[in-house]
Amino acid sequence: MNTSEAIELLKKKGYKTTGKRKDILTYFEEADGYRTAKDLIQHLEETHKGISFDTIYRNLHLYNEVGILETTELNGEKHFRMNCTHHHHHHFICKDCGKTKEIEICPMDEVKQTLANYEIEGHKFEIYGLCPGCQHA
Amino acid sequence: MNTSEAIELLKKKGYKTTGKRKDILTYFEEADGYRTAKDLIQHLEETHKGISFDTIYRNLHLYNEVGILETTELNGEKHFRMNCTHHHHHHFICKDCGKTKEIEICPMDEVKQTLANYEIEGHKFEIYGLCPGCQHA
DNA sequence: TTACAAACCGTAACGATTACGATATGATAC
DNA sequence: GTATCATATCGTAATCGTTACGGTTTGTAA
């Protein structure tokens, strides 16, 4: 997903297009990895001095709800990234820069067989560490 | 791991044995699943009225550090459970009661091959849903 | 039984997030 | 273009889980 696709989706759902909304989307499109609300606030302070927490979190929640962003919890803070809509996969996540690498392997088919009487609602498979670029920092 | 093994381990590492420490361990041994700090406080209030946050969190951290408890993050709250030390495995976690079921499948061997230049520090594989007992509640 | 480090208490502070009344602003209809 | 109105935003206070701290109590080992 990219910024213009996301704006299109928001319009279709009846949400208004604002400068702040666009800038938030652009930030995540360019980030190419997981970022926190704080990262985003810091970035937006440059162009939108005094932007409200309300605006930040309201839009993060909205984007997450309509599927523009996906989220994960990393040492007590929520992290967000542009959603990859094309197919099911998981991520390696760099602890330093937040960048991700797609992992195509998913063992849920096998796992489901061992959970016959269980109602499965979701699963999380994430690998953490340092990406090649961050190993010598 | 059970309460007496845990106490033994603490002693060996030079930590003191107190009534509160024992009761915390017993709570997790009997819980048989993930519990929050709040759950624990609620339980201990009965027998140790006015117990301090400091005591709760200090011991939770300690237990986590020495490997008595393992931890996961579930909708913004840290959850703890008695550690299963015997072998590597993952968990199905019931959203309602916090009970877990061991999953023996782990795809990390395959995954490692696709992350040749990456430094892997850890991974998380969890399945969420409702256990058979909680499906009709 | 004394001595002392470790454990604990009561409470304040912290950081991330949520919430709210008042104001501003896109989008639509005229 | 302008009026209308629901939605978005602001400024700020409140909330929630967690952490921190000075003072007191308590296991433990000599």
Image (spheres, coloured by chain):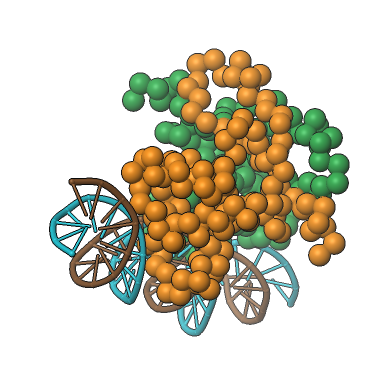
Chain colours: A green, B orange, C cyan, D brown
D16 horizontally vs D12: left or right = right
Front residue of B91 and A49: B91
Q: Residue at x 44, y 61 (%)?
A: B20
The image position of residue A57, as x and y in percent, is 52, 59
Q: Is A13 displayed left or right of A71 in the figure?
A: right
Q: Is residue A5 visible?
A: yes
Quarter that holds the N terminus of chain A: top right
Depth check: give the residue in front, D13 or B8. Answer: B8
Q: Is residue A115 left or right of residue A7?
A: right
Residue A37, image x and y in percent?
47, 52
Residue A121 image position (x, y, % from top left) = 76, 48
How many marks on residues?
0
Which residue is at a point 42% across and 74% down the rendered structure image? Answer: B50
The correct choice, above or below, for A59 with respect to D25 in the image is above
Q: Quadrant of residue B27?
A: bottom right
- Pick whichever, A90 or B86, lies toward us: B86
The residue under the point 66% across, 19% down is B110
